[in-house]
Image (cartoon, rainbow, N blue to C red):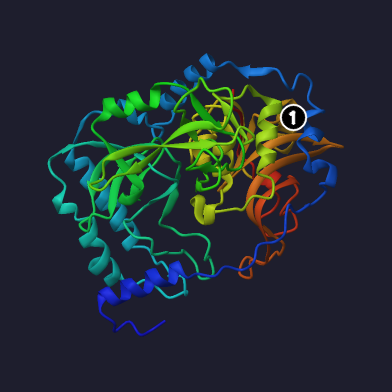
Amino acid sequence: MKKILLSSCAVFFLFTSVYADEELPPLPKGPLILTSATPAMQSPDYWIRRIPGAEKPVKTMDQIKHFNDEIKSMVPENIDVLKLDKTRPGKAVADQLQLEYSTLKNRKLFDAQDKVVPKSFFEDNIKPLVQIDQVPSKIKVKWGVATRATSVRALPTMFKMIEGQGDYEFDQLQFTLIKLWTPVAIYHTSSDGKWFYVQAPYVRGWVKAKDIAIFEGRDELKTRLKTGSSLVVTGESVRVFSDEGLKEVYQRPTMGTVIPMASSKTSEGPYPVWMPYRKEGGNVGLKKCFISRKSDVTKGFPVYSQANVIRQAFKLLGARYGWGGMYNGRDCSGFAHDVFLSFGIDLPRDSKQQAMVGTQLGYFEPFQNEAEKKAVLRSARPGITLMKMPHHQMIYLGTVNGQFYTIHSTWAERIGDDPKKDEKNRINQVVVSDLDLNGNSYISSLFDRIVSINEVD
């Protein structure tokens, strides 16, 4: 990196350029077969056949709607954007902006080239963009939708900040991705007009303004989202075409995305759907696009059963790990979120919050309660059971020959007993493994570190 005697604008340009041109190490070829897993275990049918009544519905759609209301009441971070007030006290938003800015400014963080991010970068480049002093005392909320999958950031910049040297894939500013058609309440705008500070259903932060189309008001947005039939993306992703002949790919929305249909009466030809776009000035426009009937989509949500959850999870086998959705991937909780979102379940995005949902089967201390954990897992229902450990979330698959198995999105397997060396093998994808993974390292096995088990029922 050039010397820090550059002007602040030059520093900002340099940082963002480094991020845009970043080259990552090649991914391991997948799906990887780990620990005692076998090739046969890489199929959903292997696990489904072992479950009595696997196809039986766990909940009806009416029960899922009630369940979602329970989730929102239990998990304050899960917000029904369409029920938010049309105005908001400015002080609450200004205080949150200040907290997020100050917290990051006071941390020791590194850029993509392992150089310490100077405090002057925050003062000279970020603070003027956030313009906390420009938040009015009473905010008139604007309402919009994401026109594509877009990042939610802690600060209005794509500049990467990492916690430790070499942690190049873990951007501390990245909260998550929100999907196409995700509704947002817009609270604030950056000084350059390129970023909105928004409340989305399960996260609050900065999104690129160019990826948000604004509705006339909350009621207009609600009407659009609640009226008519929808297609649910049940594959890893699907192609949406701008033409009925299916020649020009317009977007590739990912699993769990819900797309309003332009008409539900057609029985032949591709499905017509509405895609939002941002007009000049920011207001929403709707474009009729098309999805092949051969695509992995369903009209409405599929049946919520153990078998179907496992099928959904295995559609992502080998899919890329991505912290907060970076690099078009999914981290551990993002993987679980997308799988359950496919059934209309508003599972929170954060693993700690996910562990609060449904029926709690047990809480544990790490490295303790071995017999109790085993008893709980033997009685747990595969597919709909989540296993939480510090900083990780997994979906339970069942037992084979006394071994417990999981499917999860994980970045690496620790293999050494020296924390300073932190030896690891990069996995960086969704895999099947037993709970002995990491067992020969200083952090110990997945099983040893489980702190809660809950069924999403």
| Identity of the residue drawn at 57% across and 41% down | 238
Looking at the picture, does residue 154 appear above or below residue 423? Answer: above
Q: Amino acid at mark 1?
A: Ala
Looking at the picture, does residue 20 appear above or below residue 237? Answer: below
**Depth check, front residue: 233 or 43:** 233
Looking at the picture, does residue 120 appear above or below residue 130? Answer: below
Residue 387 percent location from the top left of the image: 63, 37
Residue 411 percent location from the top left of the image: 62, 56
| Identity of the residue drawn at 51% across and 14% down | 62
**Depth check, front residue: 421 or 160:** 160
- In this figure, which residue is indicated by the disc labeled 1? 375
Using residue 228 as the reference point, say whether residue 443 is left or right of it: right
Q: Quadrant of residue 457?
A: top right
Secondary element under disc 1, as helix, strand or loop, is helix
Is there any visible trace of residue 362 in the rendered image?
A: yes
Residue 134 percent location from the top left of the image: 14, 51
